[in-house]
Image (cartoon, grey):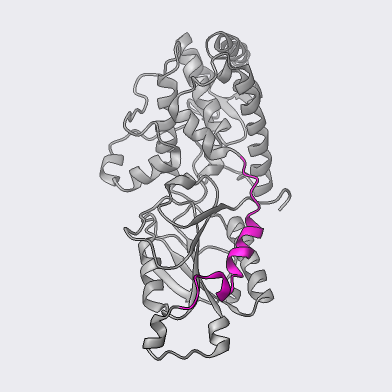
Amino acid sequence: MPERNDTQKQISAAILQLRLRQPFFATLSLFAQIRVSESVDTAMTDGRSIIFNPTFWQKLTPAERLGVLTHEVLHVALQHVPRRGQRDAQLWNIAADIVVNGIIAHLEGLELPQGHLREPGLENLCVEEVYQQLQQNRQRTTQLRVPLDLKQPGQEEEPLLHEEHERLRDYWWRAIKQARNTNTQPGHLPLGLERELSRIEPSRLDWRSYLWRFLTQTPSDFAGFDRRFIGQRLYLDAQENEQLYAYIAVDTSGSITDHDLNLFLGEVRGILDAYPHVVGQLYYVDTECYGPYEVNSVANELPPSGGGGTNFCPFFERVQAEHKAWQNAVCVYLTDGFGIFPKEPPGLPVLWVVTGYHLEKEAFPFGEVIELVPDEGS
């Protein structure tokens, strides 16, 4: 018990010391729930609180204490546990450590214990981007040290529910805003941190209204009748010409949660029920394309992931093969945007509905991008 009390006092002293050196990170530390316990070997977080082993803490130098404290606070503040979603936990933890350790490497007066993970070529990316890079180079990944400070599935007795995730996201975004206000050197945050912060900034765009507007287009919303069809003697039935085919893809590589899928499919079903002229065809895609399925017949749960990453090409290739030239059609893709894009854009309007911590909107090579943002309490 005395060792635990001493450690708690030393952690408080470290936060005060951090305030003199790095006020932004010290402010974030004040928002963290920190405990001392022998239940962990070193230090770890479950997304809610931070736990330090007292024996491990006592062995650290003063500079290492500042570094380890900041390391854990960043994992919590940047929501690395809930951001993992259904991704491979070990690979995600490695990616998160690469980013966090890269941030700390640029902070004066902070150090990390010997043997910590560093990949300078990746650390200025966001965690999702690093994860994608590691996923594409599994041989290199096996040579990297596995982090121990983010809980693995099975270790966590009470996983974060969606409502708790939303509450923590709002809590930490307010903390980040306050930390920015106390930062005496605005604009001097490490690049890796700036990219991470851009991933968790709340969006206020009404994704539902945008999706309805996109999926209820009529032929008059398109460029007009293609005169090539006259030469092909294609005289279309009026009812057929009024239909709009919606090719809908759901990324099953691990980034989409069942909750997000439930919101998305619920809205799509509402559109199809309200507008009989919209014909929806659903596909599940990871590195291959499966379907089509009837939108109203599938469950609101994702099928098992193949774990092979994301490739957007198979879906668009399938659409190109199945779509008839005279049909009005659009493509809608529910994803986080991290994957392999086609070299050429498809000849149809595309709407990317991005969820969670996604690729920057400017990085999508074609189509429109809208962020799925759950309503409060949904």
Residue 177, percent from left and from top: 64, 27
In the displayed structure image, the side of residue 1 where residue 196 appears, left or right: left
The residue positioned 52% from the left and 44% from the top of the image is 357
In the displayed structure image, the side of residue 288 where residue 328 appears, left or right: right
Residue 82, percent from left and from top: 56, 43
Q: Is residue 111 above or below residue 256?
A: above
The residue positioned 58% from the left and 31% from the top of the image is 77
Query: Which portion, as a residue range, is magenta?
Result: 202-225
Residue 66 shows up from this direction = yes
The residue positioned 69% from the left and 74% from the top of the image is 274
Q: Nearer the viewer, residue 300 or 53?
A: 300
The residue positioned 41% from the left and 42% from the top of the image is 129
Q: Is residue 329 above or below residue 188?
A: below
Badge count: 0
Q: Is residue 188 above or below residue 230?
A: above
Residue 340, percent from left and from top: 35, 54
Residue 136, percent from left and from top: 31, 48
Determine if the magenta segment contains residue 224: yes
Residue 140 sits in quarter = top left
Residue 89 sits in quarter = top left
Quadrant position of the N terminus in the picture:
top right
Q: Nearer the viewer, residue 261 or 278?
A: 278
Determine if the magenta segment contains residue 84: no
Residue 359 shows up from this direction = no
